[in-house]
Image (cartoon, rainbow, N blue to C red):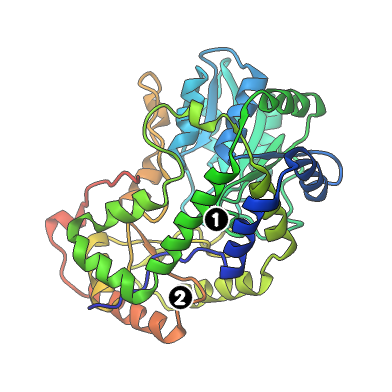
């Protein structure tokens, strides 16, 4: 089939690309743009603008200077770069297993993992929903831990309510995220002294160039155009087995290799201007359509295909992750009807336990990720195409399973 609906649609309009390119020519006062953006983001003064969530997290750890060997409890499914950053700062990530229904860290096993070296807990709100922070916040208070929340996948627009019990909340405007500015992040840092140390450290970093930002904008404009059904289908046919690798590498924000030097950039003036513009013109109607599309698909899934996070709060279906005992066959069945599904539409992966902490092995998270498939549920996918997808999924689950499919191999996500 020559036409193929892409697995993900960037949350950006052609007019937004035009604004970003024009900003690359006129925006110059980065410090002034940053101050105004931070004030609008957090009127109480807690805001901090960064080049990316990863840059902000690196800043946070640099400013805290936690003792080497200190442990950070982390959601067992998260972005692998967050673990790389912890490791680069001499810290040890200890995974806390998740509840597949809420995708929240399980407090009971966490009680057995906390120890004298534990410094903080980092929770990730996954796939466009929110986990209930209250049990984790109470746990953190009991043990005197810092509480950080990664809200990169959970943004729902200006005025988004981060949890007031979190010490730091991090939001991303990277290429695949809701309200993308093709980069950038906004943090809320409760402690004023810590926030000032982070600001001082970031001030010593070089600034992203306007031309470099323009190159990113043009790259993702091209990506948006080639992910329309006909060109996307032609590319899928041309690349065959290497298609997934091509798509994943096309949206990668950072290059392989040493990560921290890539993170040490201040956001450019055009990037800051574009983040501010995207927030002013946030498309709430599209967010509502996306949520409705995801809820419709959730209500029509075959019995043998289950949606993750069914009990999460405020689900907006940034991604639509399902679990199947036959994930590879599910993908083939979807692609046969011209709709792309994938096992690596998101970069999240399971966090490996430290060698000396086997008790932190995240059994539920590993089982969940072994059968994971991401289905398209964005609002631009017509309802009739979603109905075709549902029929294809039902047909795939009716097929007899092979031994290999009953116990599928684990896939690590790029």
Left or right of 330? Residue 78 is: right
> Which image quadrant for residue 16?
bottom right
Q: Which residue sits at x=41%, y=36%?
A: 351
> Which image quadrant for residue 188?
top right
- Return the residue at label 2: 297
Residue 308 position (above or below residue 58): below
Residue 21 lies, in percent from the top left, at 59, 57
Residue 301 lies, in percent from the top left, at 39, 74
Name the front one of labels 1 and 2: 1
Say which quadrant the N terminus sits in. bottom left
Tell which of 376 and 96 is nearer to you: 376
Left or right of 354? Residue 67 is: right
- Return the residue at label 1: 177
Element at badge 2?
Answer: helix
Q: Give the class, few, some or many, for how many residues have Cα within 10 Å of label 2's Cα (few <14, many ≥20).
A: many
How far is the residue under mark 1 from the one under mark 2?
Answer: 21 Å
From this viewpoint, which residue is outermost toward the bottom?
A: 384
Residue 153 lies, in percent from the top left, at 56, 52
Q: Are marks 1 and 2 in contact (CB under 8 Å)?
A: no
From this viewpoint, which residue is outermost toward the right?
A: 44
Residue 63 position (above or below residue 251): above
Disc with the residue nearer the chain's start (1 vs 2): 1
Residue 60 shows in this picture: yes
Q: Which residue sits at x=59%, y=12%?
A: 67
Residue 339 shows in this picture: no
Left or right of 370? Residue 350 is: right
Tell which of 380 and 315 is nearer to you: 380
Q: Which residue sits at x=80%, y=24%?
A: 193
Say which quadrant the C terminus sits in. top left
Residue 276: mark in rendering: none
Number of numbered markers: 2
């Amino acid at each position: 089939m020559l036409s193929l609906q892409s697995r993900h649609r960037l949350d950006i309009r052609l007019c937004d690309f035009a604004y970003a390119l024009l900003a690359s020519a006129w925006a110059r006062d980065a410090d002034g743009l940053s101050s105004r953006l931070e004030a609008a983001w957090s009127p109480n003064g807690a805001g901090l603008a960064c080049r990316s969530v990863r840059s902000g997290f690196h800043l946070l750890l640099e400013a805290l200077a936690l003792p080497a060997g200190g442990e950070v409890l982390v959601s067992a499914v998260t972005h692998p770069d967050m673990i790389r950053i912890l490791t680069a700062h001499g810290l040890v990530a200890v995974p806390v297993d998740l509840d597949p229904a809420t995708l929240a860290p399980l407090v009971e096993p966490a009680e057995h993992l906390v120890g004298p070296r534990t410094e903080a807990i980092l929770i990730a709100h996954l796939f466009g929903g929110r986990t209930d922070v209250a049990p984790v916040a109470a746990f953190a208070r009991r043990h005197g831990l810092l509480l950080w929340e990664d809200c990169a996948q959970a943004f729902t627009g200006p005025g988004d309510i981060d949890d007031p019990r979190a010490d730091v909340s991090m939001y991303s405007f990277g290429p695949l995220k809701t309200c993308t500015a093709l980069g950038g992040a906004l943090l809320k840092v409760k402690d004023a002294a810590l926030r000032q140390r982070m600001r001082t450290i970031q001030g010593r970093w070089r600034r992203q160039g306007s031309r470099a930002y323009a190159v990113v904008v043009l790259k993702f404009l091209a990506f948006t155009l080639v992910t329309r059904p006909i060109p996307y289908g032609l590319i899928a046919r041309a690349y065959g087995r290497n298609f997934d690798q091509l798509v994943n590498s096309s949206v990668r924000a950072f290059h392989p290799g040493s990560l921290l030097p890539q993170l040490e950039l201040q956001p450019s003036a055009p990037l800051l201007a574009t983040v501010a513009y995207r927030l002013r013109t946030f498309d709430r109607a599209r967010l509502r359509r996306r949520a409705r599309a995801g809820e419709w698909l959730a209500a029509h899934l075959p019995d043998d295909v289950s949606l993750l996070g069914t009990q999460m709060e405020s689900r907006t279906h940034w991604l639509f992750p399902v679990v199947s005992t036959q994930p590879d066959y599910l993908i083939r069945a979807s692609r046969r009807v011209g709709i792309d599904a994938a096992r690596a539409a998101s970069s999240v992966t399971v966090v490996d336990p430290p060698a000396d902490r086997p008790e932190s092995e995240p059994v539920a998270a590993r089982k969940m990720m072994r059968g994971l498939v991401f289905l398209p549920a964005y609002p631009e996918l017509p309802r009739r195409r979603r109905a075709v997808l549902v029929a294809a999924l039902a047909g795939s689950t009716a097929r007899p399973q092979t031994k290999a499919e009953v116990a599928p191999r684990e896939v690590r996500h790029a």
